[in-house]
Image (cartoon, grey):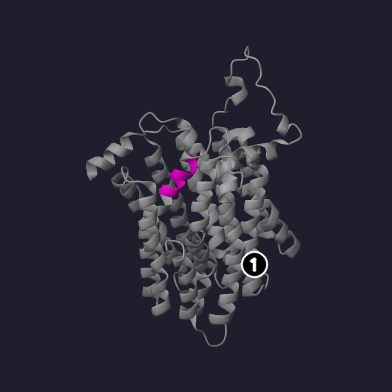
Amino acid sequence: MRAKLVESFSTLNGASRDLWLVFILKFLESYSYFSMSLVLTMFLSQEFKLSDSHAGFAYGTMGSLTSIYGLLVGSLIDKWGVRQSLLTGIIMVTFFRTVMVFTTSRLVLYFSIFFGLPLGGCLIIPVLTLAIRRYTTTSNRGFAFGLFYSIMNLGALFSGFVVDGLSMLIDPGTLLGLTANRWVFVTGMICSLAMIPLALAIQPEVPSTQMHDMSAPPPPADKSCVQLGPWTRSAREIWALRSFWRFLALTLITVNLRSIFRHLDASLPKYMVREFGPDVAKGSIYSLNPLVIIFLVPLVSALTQTRENFDVIHAGAYLSAISVFLLSIWTSVYACVAFILVLSLGEALWSPRLYDYTVSVAPEGKEGMFLALSSAPLFFATLPVGMLSGILLERYCPEHGPRDSRRMWFIIGGLTLSSPL
């Protein structure tokens, strides 16, 4: 086992410097994203007095808009390439994360979470994913995606600990006029600033048109596309691919499964605070998920390299789905810990393989549009998940009054289990 793991790491020897820059960028962006997601609904309720349902709606809308903006800029990503797309997105999120630190205006808040942050994010997250394909070979791509996923979870791991640390240090007061939630946003802003010079260090890509034989005559124009813009043309080309529809079907099947991770942000923190008190280590319990993933994913990726993607995805999906029911039969901190551990074991199996499969079927030069179109169902599902989270919290786990949290998690578990079935 150890020899196989060492052999897998050795496949990255001589890898492009840009690949390692992408790994560092992934860590910084993951920390910024997960730290904000972990406190966002509580921030909206505590500091802007939004109800659970309104906070959940805002959280879900932000995710859905990421999908809409991703569809609009998908062809632009293919045109700009990795470096320019990343720089544009990083500058945007840096500005709007700074705004989130200081704003007290609902209008500015909504502009930030409904426009600036999702638009900037859709120029970063999918671009980092397709960069792994650009900077790897078929011999090391599977393991690189496993490592990429572990690095993402390393960022999530740190986010949980930082959230708990800042809460213990500052709550229920302020430090330099800022609440603990706003200090979480400060740390994300700092990470975003650090990403700018790293993105600048990535080598500019050679446009695909410059790699063709310029002496050759241009290909004949497709008259059916003469009146179409670049976005529509790219979308039509991808919609004509059978591989796209197969992957879209897989994406739709796994929507409910992946929605459980939205509940980790939107439902679990409020649930723990209300059931176990404000001093509960919500961030540290949340961090058990990335902690397990960091150690398991490289190991699982190395041990399952010869197995088919669908077999590994199916087995992991069952484990993740049944984990939710632990909270429907047991209301305690230990049940939260057990839920996270079982969920993480399943995730270590299915999620890296889904990443790998996504980019492996994307056509060369169309990865940005392909990723945007194929991931649309997941992000569109974020809106109903956010709304459902708020409604379930208000009905079964309100801040004041009687609670029936087990029923809330039973409903969530039933929806999640529909994916592997």
| Magenta stretch: dominant secondary structure | helix
Task: Give the side of residue 261 with respect to residue 115, left or right.
Answer: left
Residue 343 occupies quadrant: bottom left
Q: What residue is at 54 percent from the left and 44 percent from the top?
A: 244
Is residue 121 visible to the viewer in this orientation of the structure? yes
Q: Where is residue 118 in the image (x, y as percent from the top left)?
A: 64, 52
Above or below 164: residue 111: above
- Which residue is more in the foreground, 16 or 163? 16
Q: Quadrant of residue 181?
A: bottom right
Quarter holding the N terminus? top left
99 versus 326 height, above or below: above
Q: On the image, numbered disc 1 is attached to which residue?
A: 57
Answer few, some or many: residues within 10 Å of disc 1's Cα (few below 14, many 20 plus, some between 14 and 19).
many
Secondary structure under tag 1 reads helix
Q: Give percent across and percent down for residue 325.
A: 41, 73
Is residue 283 in the magenta section? no
The residue segment tinted magenta is: 353-359
Q: Residue drawn at (49%, 41%), measured in percent from left and top?
A: 359
Which of 298 and 276 lies nearest the eye of the viewer? 298
Q: Which amino acid type is shown beneath numbered disc 1?
A: Phe
